[in-house]
Image (tube, rainbow, N blue to C red):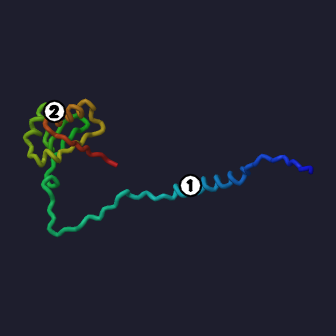
Amino acid sequence: MNFAVRKRRAPSIIIVSLVDILTILLIFFVVSTTFKKDQPEVQINLPESKTATKAPAELEHAIVTVDETDAVKLDGQSIEVNELEGAVRNLSPTKKASLALQADKKASFGTIVKVMDALKLAGVRNLPAFTRE
């Protein structure tokens, strides 16, 4: 008996259909990410209270201001940088806890650093700064 020997062909993968599928997936991901809306990550609905009162830190606050001429003011009163540490130490604890820095953009950096050093030496831990949008 003669058996016919067939040569096996190597399997071939049709790449054209794979490229089409990958192109469609790429278009899907690009389109789906561009339509994503900017939403806050966590939305919190706070409860309402009829008897709520403002905390003293919200009512009393102190502001250290440095203007463009490097003049330093504490709550609107002019003060020298050397005297700032002692003046801040004499503030009430609620005012000291809510102290903020407001510096002009034309104020010298050296003066601002001196003010920040004086405030740190006076015991101010958190020092927020006012900015504009």
Q: Position of residue 11 (x, y in %)?
A: 76, 48
Along the horizontal axis of the image, is 127 left or right of 9? left
Return the residue at label 2. Answer: 81
Circle 2 or circle 1, nearest the eye: 1
Q: Residue at x 25, y 43 (%)?
A: 129
Mark linked to residue 123: none
Q: Position of residue 122 (x, y in %)?
A: 13, 36
Q: Earlier in the sequence, mark 2 or mark 1?
A: 1
Along the horizontal axis of the image, is 10 left or right of 85? right
Identified by mark 2, the residue type is Val
Secondary element type, mark 2: helix
Which residue, as the protein is rendered here, is positioned at the far right? Answer: 1
Which residue, as the protein is rendered here, is positioned at the far bottom? Answer: 50
Return the residue at label 1. Answer: 29
In the depicted view, which residue is nearer to us: 71 or 18?
18
Q: Residue at x 16, y 33 (%)?
A: 118
Along the horizontal axis of the image, is 117 left or right of 6? left
Q: Position of residue 91 (x, y in %)?
A: 9, 43
Q: Position of residue 59 (x, y in %)?
A: 14, 55
How far apart are labels 2 and 1 at the CA level?
57 Å
Crowd rating for badge 2 (residues with CA inside 10 Å; few <14, some 14–19, many 20+): many
